[in-house]
Image (cartoon, rainbow, N blue to C red):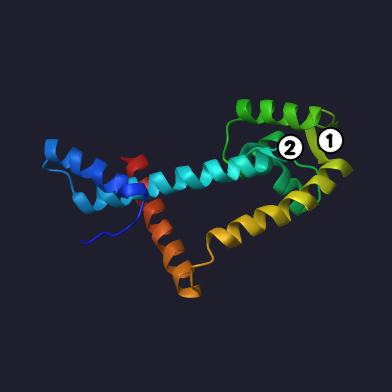
Amino acid sequence: MNFDVNFKGNEVEVRVRKLAEHFPQLEWDSLYTMMTYIHTTHEVYNEMSGKLSEHNLSVGKMKILMPLFAYRKALTPSELAVYSGVTRSTMTSVIDGLERDGYIKRASLNDRRMTAIHLTEKGVEHINTVVPMYASFVSNLMQDFTEEDHKIFVGLLHKLRTGLERFKDS
């Protein structure tokens, strides 16, 4: 496979070639592809985190605010944990921070044994400010993708997800 991905001096290729010198049994294509993916996603995450921090948010906080905004109803911490893919303990600390910032509030559900998380008006206003910035970031990031590129990329990510599930099951 001929790779001409241009990372700062193609550092990913250099790293993988160095590993291959020590481990000739490594499958070059898979390792190079995965290392390129990890390197890129790390950079995207860092840029996104930086942009969100300018608005007193983090990726974790956005994972809580977005479903509350999208569904326009109170959700339990358990529902938010499932939606955002984090543990309940992580959820508690993120909720505490969002509540301190005034973006959400806790209230009891009908049976008073369960807590519901509500988006405050301040939270709605903040999301209305941040989402256009976030959408612009994503659009700019992916402006070179064609419609076909998007379909292929999503298909490849689904294949990667299938491989991850197979790995988890073994």
Circle 2: residue type: Thr
Circle 1 residues within 10 Å: few <14, some 14–19, many ≥20: some
Say above or below: 101 vs 136: above
Residue 130: percent from left, percent from top: 73, 49
Instruction: Name the mark on residue 9.
Output: none
Could you say which quadrant of the image residue 97 lies in?
top right
Residue 115: percent from left, percent from top: 79, 31
Q: How many marks?
A: 2
The answer to whether residue 72 is left or right of residue 23 is right
Q: Secondary structure at mark 2?
A: loop
Of residue 163 and residue 24, the one placed in the foreground of this image is 24
Say above or below: 78 vs 126: above
User: Which of the two discs, 1 and 2, sits closer to the camera?
Assistant: 2
Circle 2 residues within 10 Å: few <14, some 14–19, many ≥20: some
Of residue 89 and residue 128, the one placed in the foreground of this image is 128
Q: Is residue 21 visible?
A: yes
Q: Secondary structure at mark 1?
A: loop
The answer to whether residue 101 is left or right of residue 32 is right
Residue 8: percent from left, percent from top: 37, 48
Of residue 59 and residue 138, the one placed in the foreground of this image is 138
The C terminus appears in which quarter of the rendering? top left
In percent of the image, x 61 and y 28: which residue is there? 90
Q: Is residue 120 visible?
A: no
Circle 1: residue type: Leu
Residue 75: percent from left, percent from top: 75, 41
Determine which residue is flagged by label 2. 76
Cα–Cα gap, marks 1 and 2: 9 Å
Determine which residue is flagged by label 1. 109
